[in-house]
Image (cartoon, rainbow, N blue to C red):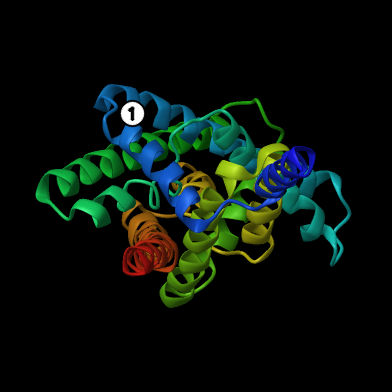
Amino acid sequence: MSGDKDQEKKNSTEAKERQSPSAQIVHDTIFAEAETELNRPTSALFWSALAAGLSMGISMIAEALLTVHLPDTEWRPLITNFGYSLGFLIVILGRQQLFTENILTPILPLLHRKDFKTFKNVGRLWGTVFIGNLLGTFCIALVAIHTDVFETDIKLAFLDLGREALKPSFLNIFLGGIFAGWLIALLVWLLPFAETARVWVIIIITYIIGVGSFSHVIAGSTEVFSLLVNGDISTLTTIMDFLLPTLLGNVLGGVLLVAVLNHAQTVAGEEDEAIDM
């Protein structure tokens, strides 16, 4: 009999190990990570964000290099957008501060506490990371356009990417930004327990953002900044026609479609458990 009980315990343990983590466990994991990030000094956040902005410039560079070296065919974007994923891969695996990742994480403590202190701390984190990211992407654009590191045809590819980013209307950039913010926040939600699939989760989701031409405020800023530093557009155009609609869309997609909904389901789950008890 004891042997049967031991086997049952073993089978139960194996079953638990094979189960996917519940939404509550994922929520708690991201919540704990958010607490750590909210307690980091502003200087540490800024330098990490600057590093992330520089790293995100690799997306534009990789995409342009692939574009130049591939024939101009209908299927070319299906290949070049793998280059778009490269910057995200570096930033996320390198644990650098990316603004759109932070759309989800610090919102969870804010939804939990609903106090001014947390709200102010979220604003500090968002503002520091956003400025650091944009400064990094601007530096990459400046070097890419105004130095001889890249050949002329590659520089022209940078500018073409910027024009493509600005081609949609304000509304369409905003709507595309919602999808991008939604997908990045989902990426953050999936990563804690992705384990060995982390690389593929990052590549697949960011690849869809690239192929779908969904506006991402940091990745796209490198391309649009290339036009700015080349003198093709003004600072006002950069802000009003790209940064503003994309920022609004990314925040709305990340906060409402992922942070609020996933927080709501975990709170509802906790309430149901309390009733059952």
**Residue 241 location, x and y as percent?**
39, 64
- Left or right of 259 on screen, residue 115: left
**Residue 116 location, x and y as percent?**
10, 50
Residue lying at the far front of the rendered structure? 1
| Disc 1 target residue | 46
220 w.r.t. 196: above or below: below
- Left or right of 253 on screen, residue 189: right
- Give the SS element for disc 1: helix
Quarter of the image for the C terminus: give it.
bottom left
**Residue 183 location, x and y as percent?**
55, 60
| Numbered circles on residues, count | 1
User: Which residue: 46% across, 31% down?
Assistant: 139
Q: Observer-nearest residue: 80 or 4?
A: 4
User: Which residue: 43% across, 55% down?
Assistant: 233
Q: Quadrant of residue 272?
A: bottom left
Q: Observer-nearest residue: 151 or 96?
A: 96
Quarter of the image for the N terminus: give it.
top right
Q: Observer-nearest residue: 192 or 62?
A: 192
Near mark 1 (Cα within 10 A), the count class, few <14, some 14-19 or many ≥20, is many
Q: Observer-nearest residue: 197 or 125?
A: 197
- Left or right of 173 on screen, residue 196: right
**Could one spot residue 134 in this view of the protein?**
yes
**Could one spot residue 63 in this view of the protein?**
no
**Residue 258 location, x and y as percent?**
44, 63
Name the residue type under label 1: Phe
User: Which residue: 33% across, 52% down?
Assistant: 108
- Left or right of 90 on screen, residue 112: left
User: Which residue: 18% across, 45% down?
Assistant: 118
